[in-house]
Structure formats: structure tokens, C-alpha cells
Image (spheres, rainbow, N blue to C red):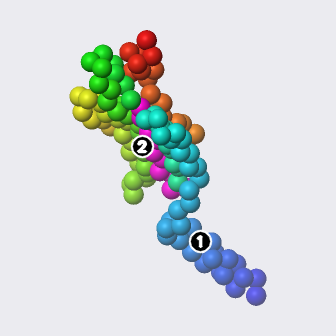
Amino acid sequence: MAKIAICFLVVLISEVLSAPQGDVQVLRYDNNNQGSGNYVYTYELSNGQIHSEAGGLSDADGDGEPVVVVSGGYSYVGDDGITYWVNYTADEDGYHPVVGQGPGGIKGGDSASLDPSVFKSLVG
Ligand SMILES: *[C@@H]1O[C@H](CO)[C@@H](O)[C@H](O)[C@H]1NC(C)=O
């Protein structure tokens, strides 16, 4: 009887361990957008995916015509178990990604922010 119980337990444990990871939960969702042009959002999922982006109006080149600039990053765990990440900024000169894998990208708990220097000419 004990043998049968142990066999049952082993089968149960291996089924739990091999269950598909389809049940993804949202661990964190922050969204701050007051409609003034500046925003920041972040979401983190239980499968290791995270994305955070901050954006705002900037007139860093001082031409009196503000543009939206964004800064953000996302990261996910591939089927191979490796963490892939992209950090990026986008401004009037285009999209500027920095791509990597392993450590070095955005991590759980991080939030994107804009480099305050992009606002210099609006503030000053
Ligand atoms: C990517 O962004 C994260 C979160 O802002 C930061 O901690 C990390 O240093 C950045 N990595 C690179 C290579 O810039």
C-alpha cells in the first residue's frame, strides 16, 4: 500500500512540475498619466516579463517645438531559459535600442524614468 502511495505521489509531483506555464499573472501594473504629456507605466508578469516606459515632452534642442521623448526597457525569459532585454530611448532622432541578454537589463521592481536633462530647456 505504501508503495502505491509513493508511486502516486511521484506521478503527481512530476505532473505538477511539467505543467504548462500558461497561467501568467500580472504581478505589478503601475500607470501614471495625468494627460500633461508626461507618463510612466510599468507591468511585471509572473513569467518574468517586465516592461517600463517613461515619456514626456522635451524641447532639448531649444527650437520652441517640443517633441515626445521616451525611455524604457523590457525583458523576458526565452524558451531557452535565457533573459533577453532591450533598453531604449526614442526622440526626434529616432529609436535607440540597447540589446542584451543575461544580467544588465531592467529587473523586477525597476521603473523607467526620463533623464532630467531632456527637460532642461522647458524648465529653464
Ligand atoms: C537598462 O535599464 C535598467 C533599468 O532602468 C538599468 O538598471 C540598466 O542599467 C540598463 N542597462 C544598460 C546597459 O543601460
Q: Residue furthest right?
A: 2
The residue identified by callout 2 is 74
Q: Which residues are magenta?
A: 46-56
Count residues near mark 1 (Cα–Cα under 10 Å), then give few for <14, some for 14-19, many for 20+: few
Give percent across and percent down for residue 124. Answer: 43, 12
Q: Which amino acid does the dot numbered 2 rest on?
A: Tyr
Of residue 30 and residue 19, the one placed in the foreground of this image is 30
Task: Please tell me whether residue 54 belongs to the stretch shown in magenta.
Answer: yes
Q: Residue at x 52, y 39 (%)?
A: 34
Q: Is residue 23 above or below residue 10?
A: above
Report the number of discs: 2
Q: Residue furthest bottom?
A: 1
Q: Residue at x 50, y 65 (%)?
A: 21
Find residue 5 and name its label: none
Q: Residue furthest top?
A: 124
Count residues near mark 2 (Cα–Cα under 10 Å), then give few for <14, some for 14-19, many for 20+: many
